Amino acid sequence: MRRVFVDAWRKANDGGPLQPLERLLAEVIAEHPEYHGFLAETDGAIGRDFPPELGEANPFLHLGLHVGIREQLAVDRPPGVVALYHRILLRAGDAHEAEHRIMDCLARSLWDAQRAGRMPDEAGYLGCLRALADR
């Protein structure tokens, strides 16, 4: 998947035609100039580890969470996520900041599901988003 991110960014910068997923990835990457140089180093970007103990964020995880949120919003899955997003957006002020706020809930939901070996808890995720919207 890392190669897909790197290749989409390269194609976008080269002005090449993009598939829908590549277009989405390029849009998300464009909003993160702090990762542009990193993604230009193809082999280094793809092979690099991001151990949690070093405290460095994994750009692929961060970008992937943005993509996941946008895909959820495109289909309102889980049901109700779009309405909660709009409430969070009102408080956040812009779409990118709203996604960053939602990202914590999504990451926690995915982490819990992975550790438990089950599907993510949609009700718990929506509850987390409701708490954000009500702050």
Image: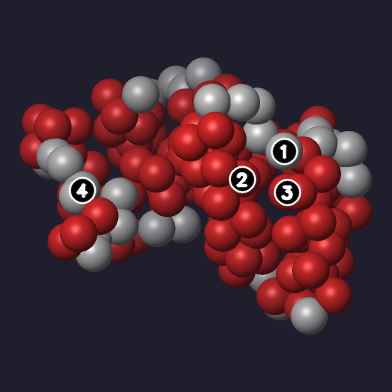
> Residue under circle 3?
125
Foreground residue, 27 or 4?
Answer: 4
Q: Quadrant of the N terminus?
A: top left
Foreground residue, 9 or 5?
Answer: 5
Task: Say if residue 11 shows up in the picture.
Answer: no
Label whose residue precedes the other's in the sequence (4 or 3): 4
Label whose residue precedes the other's in the sequence (2 or 4): 4
| Label at residue 33 | none
Are the residues tagged 3 and 1 within 8 Å (C-beta)?
yes
> Residue under circle 1?
121
Label whose residue precedes the other's in the sequence (1 or 2): 2
Q: Quadrant of residue 16?
A: top left
CA–CA distance in space, label 2 to label 4: 20 Å
> Residue under circle 2?
109
Q: Secondary structure at mark 1?
A: loop
Residue at position x 67%, y 70% from top?
94
Are the residues tagged 1 and 2 within 8 Å (C-beta)?
yes
Would you say 41 lies left or right of 113 here? left
- The amino acid beneath tag 2 is Ser
Q: Secondary structure at mark 4?
A: loop
CA–CA distance in space, label 1 to label 2: 7 Å
Q: Secondary structure at mark 2?
A: helix
> Residue under circle 4?
50
